[in-house]
Amino acid sequence: MKKILRKLRSRMALNIIGAFVLVLLIFGIAVSTIGYLSFTGAFKNEYATSTYHMADTASVLVKGDHIDDYLEGKESEEYSQTAKNLDLYCKRMSVSLIYVIKVDTSDYGRFVSVFNSVNNDVDNSAYTPWELGHKRDTTNDEYREKYEALYHKEADFETIYRINTTDGQHPHITTMVPVKNSAGDVVSILCMQRPIREIRTVTRAFLIRIALFTLIAAVLISVTIAIYIRKQVVKPIRKVSNEATRFAQENSKGEPLGEISKFDEVLNLSTSIEKMEADMVSYVDNLTALTAEKERIGTELSLATKIQASMLPHDFPPFPDRTKFDIYASMTPAKEVGGDFYDFFMIDDDHLGIVIADVSGKGIPAALFMMISKVILQNFAMMGMNAAQTLTRMNEAICDHNQEEMFVTVWMGILELSSGKLTAANAGHEYPALRRANGRFELFKDKHGFVIGGMDGVRYKEYEITLDPGDKLFLYTDGVPEATNADKKLFTTDRMIDALNVDPDASPRQILDNVTNAVNDFVKDAEQFDDLTMLCLEYKERKDG
């Protein structure tokens, strides 16, 4: 039996017929769903409209001017007569409940009962009438919103449906209408609950008819299609399939298939099989070579990523024994490897070098240029040069061997830890952001020199900033303000400053996390086109003299 079933499942005709049946079933489900939704919507609208008119009529029986008097025990004779009228109306209209409530308009979260008519016979319910003055919390936010809309005269009536109930109640509709005083102000709400159990009976019959129609149509269409497909499609395709199977086993060209079908598609398929037999061996060889080359490139890129990451400081805190500053940095490349880099290093016991740079271009060329630039810059800085001299010598060295005409923007600073004096130079890089103690981050618009590698003979100038304890310096590449979302909008420097000031007192690491989260929330799933590199320094201590 298992072999027979497996053979049947492998039959093309059965699979095609199964597909048609599946389409019919999906069509039937779609028709049923659309019909059900349309029918239910029309049914609910009809009930909502008719119940509104019933509730509106009932509201005429209630004198809005005397609501407060009723609650205070006044107008007792009139109250009793109104209650009797509502009870009689509840039974005549075959509704489960008619109740009038005065809602606490401070938050619409509570109400007090004024009238409460119960007709449990209409739906075999078990409701207990509320006494005059019975207080109760509003059922949920849906009721609260509808109460508020009625009191604000935003709607003539409001309706709540409970078709699939889970609290033991039967399906019902509750329609609410305002009760107004003689001045036209809403003083209470009349609610009418009406059973709608028949909606399930009617919709069940509707769905059964659709299901039967779909089943009969599926059987008739399947038989017709089976006969036609077997003769015009299945047999010719089986012949093509057998030839393909033979070729896969023997790897040799067979006899021409000839005119096996009147359909062009099947003839084209047989022609393709014959061509495939001639090209397959060569294709497999080429595919094998291409796969090996792709794996080799992937391995090399992975290794390049690890090499580049290892060249950047990545252990934090980098100087555990030094308490005068806290520093944190990160670099997220747009591709496997990137052209941005950051660096920080102790030049001597009292001077910390800080660098952030952005190489032109992307990918492996930018990564190679980045590593060369980093090594050259650090070598000159460790020779005791100031920031301007370091960038000047770096520019000379790169311009001497820059046949590809690449360039790099660089911001470099040297912090004297004992005094807080920071000397810095900017070679075409982004403005840094500076935050004074107990203040907010703001852009520090320093003077820019020309980019490194762009022109020989450039001389760079430096400037000084004195950092006080608690001051923070934030450096970044253009990948941060130029991060782009799916609508081609930029993150911008303003959004970056806002992200920095979300928690300016946070640690450098948390500040970078805040900016990263802001960028990710803005960009979402859009592809990253530029490297994302940031560095934050907090100066903690200064000893003058």
Image (spheres, rainbow, N blue to C red):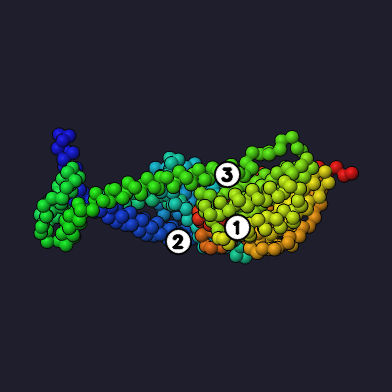
Q: Residue under label 2, please give it.
A: 53
Residue ID at (29%, 56%): 31
Q: Judge by depth and name the residue closer to the eye, 307 or 18.
A: 307
Which is more foreground, mark 1 or mark 2?
1
Residue ID at (45%, 43%): 299
What kind of residue is marked 3?
A: Ala
Residue ID at (74%, 47%): 383
Whether residue 369 can be seen here:
yes
Residue 155: % across, % down: 53, 62
Does 169 sit left or right of 544 as displayed?
left
Which of the two discs, 1 and 2, labels the residue nearer the N terminus?
2
Q: Residue under label 1, please give it.
A: 401
Whether residue 43 can be seen here:
no
Which of the two discs, 3 and 2, labels the residue nearer the N terminus?
2
Does 194 sit left or right of 261 as displayed?
right
Instruction: Please tell me how crowded label 2 is: few (under 14), some (14-19), or many (20+) other residues with Cα within 10 Å.
Output: some
Instruction: Please tell me how crowded label 3 is: few (under 14), some (14-19), or many (20+) other residues with Cα within 10 Å.
Output: some
What kind of residue is marked 2?
A: His
Could you give the CA–CA distance between mark 1 and mark 2, rounded to whole angstroms? 89 Å
Which is more foreground, mark 3 or mark 1?
1
Callout 3 secondary element: helix
Does 407 sit left or right of 168 as displayed?
right
What kind of residue is marked 1?
A: His
Q: Judge by depth and name the residue closer to the eye, 366 or 218.
A: 366
Q: Residue under label 3, please give it.
A: 309
Residue 133: % across, % down: 60, 46
